[in-house]
Amino acid sequence: MTNNNPIGIFDSGIGGTSIWKAIHELLPNEKTIYLADSKNAPYGQKTKDEIVALSRKNVDYLLAQNCKLIVVACNTATTNAIRELREEYNVPFIGIEPAIKPAANNSKTQVIGILATQGTLNSELFNKTAEMFQHTTIIEQVGHGLVQLIEDGNLNSPEMTQLLESYLQPMIEANIDYLVLGCSHYPYLLPQIKKILPDHIQIIDSGEAVARQTQNVLREKTGFTENKQEEPEFYVNSDPKVLESILDYKYPVVYKDF
């Protein structure tokens, strides 16, 4: 089955590029269109209705570009809006949610940490998943301020270090052996996080799992691109400079007020 239409990916900002990179690495022939709704970031402090409305806006834009499937590369948007999106649109959706299952199933201490946005931790989907692991203690921590610092280009600032230490130290003291990154922005903080965490604590993010699921959906529902497609497209509705730097200036980033 062949389908040369692009894969659409959206996030509340630049963080979902961690998901895009995993997809692009696994499926290099597929054309991708990435939408960074940085003007409205972070989604994690918004109401469910606001998150659903913003997600619809992003989906409408990507469908106008003839995308064959859409990856919701945002934990907050997935946990708050993907059910509504699947009900309203006739296109496959792939979501991203905190990887509680592999962490809980592999934990030796039966204590795991989740670093996520308020919107994700408050969502019905997250709490339903967490309830499945009654024998595991889940230390939840809202990453207040982290997304905004990343969006502002302050990955390595003293403020970022202070916030991460304040969020992670209580988890270390609680004897976690797995830390789940519950926001697609957070993989960009891995160098700082690894400096804080002891070596025995494993870190899990969802990039590779989302890429494999994207491959499965292409195989089963939409079809693969026949030949290698043109370069990926990146759109942002705020200053493109931070997104360009995250992409190591390999691709042009277009400002668009969507």
Image (cartoon, rainbow, N blue to C red):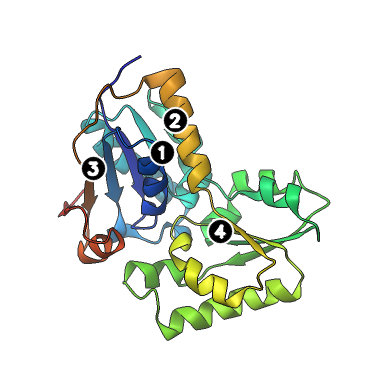
Mark nearer the viewer, 1 or 4? 1
Please rate how many residues cluster around mark 2, counting C-alpha atoms within 10 Å: few if below 14, some from 14 to 19, many from 20.
some
Image spot of residue 136 (x, y percent): 79, 54
Tell me: residue 190, above or below residue 48.
below
Which quadrant, please, contains the N terminus? top left
Q: Nearer the viewer, residue 20 or 226?
A: 226
Please rate how many residues cluster around mark 1, counting C-alpha atoms within 10 Å: few if below 14, some from 14 to 19, many from 20.
some
User: Which of the two discs, 3 and 1, labels the residue nearer the N terminus?
Assistant: 1
Residue 181: give its label.
4
Q: Nearer the viewer, residue 157 or 119?
A: 157
Residue 215: give its label.
2
On screen, residue 70 versus residue 94, left or right, reads left
Residue receiving disc 3: 232
Is disc 1 in contact with disc 4, using a CB cutoff of under 8 Å? no
Mark nearer the viewer, 3 or 4? 3
Is disc 2 in contact with disc 1, using a CB cutoff of under 8 Å? yes
How far is disc 4 from disc 2 in space, using C-alphas? 22 Å
Name the residue rendered at 62%, 73% in the picture.
197
Image spot of residue 148 (x, y percent): 38, 69
Amino acid type of the residue that numbered disc 3 sits on in the rendered structure: Pro
Which structural element holds mark 2? helix
The residue lying furthest to the right in this view is 135
Residue 26: give its label.
1
Name the residue rendered at 49%, 40% in the picture.
210
How far is disc 2 from disc 1 in space, using C-alphas? 8 Å
How far is disc 1 from disc 4 in space, using C-alphas? 21 Å
How far is disc 2 from disc 3 in space, using C-alphas? 17 Å
Amino acid type of the residue that numbered disc 4 sits on in the rendered structure: Leu
Tell me: residue 27, above or below residue 135.
above
User: Which of the two discs, 4 and 2, labels the residue nearer the N terminus?
Assistant: 4
Which structural element holds mark 3? loop
